Amino acid sequence: MKQVFETEFAGRKLSVEVGEIAKQADGSAFVRFGETVVLATACCADEPKEGDFFPLTVNYEEKQYAVGKIPGSFLRREGRAGEHATLAARLIDRPIRPLFAEGFRNEVQLVSTVMSVDPDNTPEMTGMLGASLALCISDIPFDGPVAGVYVGRVNGKLIIDPNEEEKKLSDIDLAVAGTDSAIMMVEAGAKEVPEEEMLDAIMFGFEAIKELCAFQKKIIKEIGKPKRHIDLYAPDPRIKEDIESRIGEKMVKAISIFDKLERQDAIDALKKEIIDDYDSREYEDEHDHKMSMLMVNDILEAMVAKEVRRLITEDKVRPDGRKVDEIRPLDCQVDLLPRAHGSAMFTRGQTQVIGTTTLGPLSDKQLIDNLTGETERRFMHHYNFPPYSVGEIGRMGAPGRREIGHGKLGERALSYVLPSEEEFPYTIRCVADVCESNGSSSQASICANCMSLMAAGVPIKGIVSGIAMGLITSGPLDGNHPYTILTDIQGLEDHFGDMDFKCAGTSKGLTALQMDIKIHGVTREVLSEALAQANKARAEIREAIASCISEPRKEVSKYAPKMVTFKIDPDKIRDVIGQGGKVINDIISRCNDVKIDVEEDGTITIYHTDKEMIEKAKAIIDDIVREAKVGEIFEGKVTRVEDYGAFVNLFGDTDGLCHVSRLKWGYVEDASKVVKVGDMLKVVVIGLDEKGKIKLSHREFEEKPEGYVEKEERVKKNDNHSSKFHGKPSSKRK
């Protein structure tokens, strides 16, 4: 039976329909926000899946019919998820995942299908609300509800879910999600916004989240199903006691080893001792064997986690011996790669990233086609995490969700300091190749590519540094349980910690944030403390970067394309391009494959590594669009001779007619008696007719005979000859 629930949110109508669509799913919600419509479903397997993780899958499906488009693929149907859909799925996943119970092993799939898109009403957050509600009204055990909002700021005023016009004017692009009691996820880009102002924006969004959670709770109270019983996975306490008694003290010592690889080798040796022992024992069947080994691995992991957390929260000692607010040793280098337009290497402890910047013409922009319409991306930041960076063997190929997410985070952090297209008319691509990783490689990639941009001669507005902050709790964040905030978290602290809070920005303020947690939310106090601690760390990293390269280079690399930008009359664009691109392709061919970008407003940008080729191409275009002016003097080659006059090339393909009466002061019966094809002739422009045809004269450059008088009848004859010229199609040679 269909039921409809409505409320007003951010000045717009929000409605939820249940009971009519997707009734066989465990839970479903048909959510309308303005004219944005998302169908959200939740399904849970009846039996647990064998494994050491929670098998949650979140899909965000974008349908082209949502904006009245037919897919452009060969098959004319939607294909694999694009970058935007991947990032949206991550956005929904991150606040929902921590709200499932520890030991939940039943597979869960959430699908948010975007069926109609109103650009002013966010489909991503509509999908998050739908996914949360689908879980909450189903019989799937879930500690929700959860909701998310976008926050913008225009002229100092904070706005919930800004429309398209407000987004363009906003200096904050913030996504925040949480429950009605705590913040679960933060993701933001900003135009160098101070920490306190960003914190105010986060809390402003949190207040709106409470409204959405209250709306969901009303629906849950009315139609929510009783939750099914799920047997949560937990290791056998007898196995746990046995393992802890045998290697507990040894594991404590191993975890305190400074070097990552040495520490890992020591931990792995202890694990192997126990695993080999249990693996060699006799079991009733293969299932018992498999489950026992699973429990052994989980117990060993829990032992490491417990000791790491105890060291940090009680002893205030980190596995590598650092203070809680101490950064690992830093090293910055530039110009590693001679042929790259800009290159740098940033090393923080055992995390190392090589960053490169490549410059290209504006025609190299990436075309983005998604549900919000076609856009162009001038700046790209790509992140690669090969398996060798953590000493492993693994699959290499197309980027996964993690690589796409980290790449986007770096793109957001650096985009706010880039020069405008008018200031620097290049397409810019940065690539971060992680060579070694022990925590926070995404922030290392931001630092590396900030340096590579400066090395490439990109006039960025300030040095951007990034750091990852962590959190270790001893219990709920209720004021009664101590917690520790960590600066520059390494692999162990990230893996076993409760928060990964990435902060990037300049000396003026933040340009990017991303927060993921594993607990049931964090408070303003925690966020404020983490941001303040991160600010101090970012300043230290900026100093290290500045000691290597303090400002952008004044010139781009000799291997980078040089460029010149100028404007022509927009009406002349067709002359430069020519029919079917004939003219512009000829210019490109004659000038060693220069790249030429032509904008609708008449802006032309020419790119090439050889400045001489750029100047040559510009000269050709200048000649094409040039217009002769009365009084201008030229020395040009005679291209054609008729009895009534000579055609003289002035510039490019532009010819003018020197009438027979203007070749000499005296009477000339036939122009061929005076000049021939190939002669150089000095002429002055004496007139332009209504069709733009050019009239020339040469006789001014010869001595005028004494007593010379222009005869009336000669003038008339000249006029008759001139009519022959006027009848020609054009003074432009084709």
Image (tube, rainbow, N blue to C red):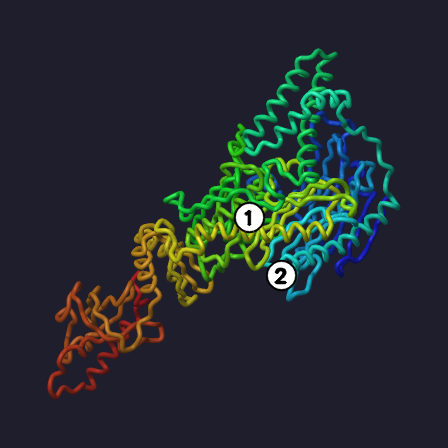
The percent coordinates of residue 392 (x first, y second) are 54, 29
Check residue 380 in the rendering and tell me which mark sits there, or answer none.
none
Residue bearing mark 2: 170
Residue 71 seen in this snapshot: no
Q: Residue furthest right?
A: 222
| Residue depicted at 29% across the width and 63% down the height | 653
Q: Quadrant of residue 156?
A: bottom right
Q: Nearer the viewer, residue 120 or 280?
A: 280
- For residue 718, what is the image quadrant? bottom left
Q: CA distance from mark 1 to mark 2?
A: 20 Å
Nearer to the camera, 719 or 466: 466
Q: Rate crowding at label 1 as few (under 14), some (14 to 19) or many (20 or more) other CA atoms within 10 Å.
A: many
- 264 shown above or below 575: above
Q: Earlier in the sequence, mark 1 or mark 2?
A: 2
Amino acid of disc 2: Ser
Q: Which mark is residue 410?
A: 1
Identify the residue at image location x=72%, y=17%: 287
Query: How many numbered marks are there?
Result: 2
- Secondary structure beneath label 1: helix
Q: Position of residue 507 (x, y in %)?
A: 55, 57
Q: Nearer the viewer, mark 1 or mark 2?
A: 1
Left of 7 or right of it: where is 308? left
User: Is the Cβ of the residue at disc 1 closer than 8 Å to that at disc 2?
Assistant: no
Q: Is 361 in front, or is 332?
A: 332
> Is residue 111 placed above or below 577 in the rendered structure?
above
Q: Position of residue 492 (x, y in %)?
A: 62, 35
What is the quadrant of the C terminus in the image? bottom left
Q: Residue 220: where, in percent of width, then height? A: 85, 45
Q: Residues within 10 Å of mark 2 (few under 14, many from 20)?
A: many
Amino acid type at mark 1: Gly
Label 2 SS: loop
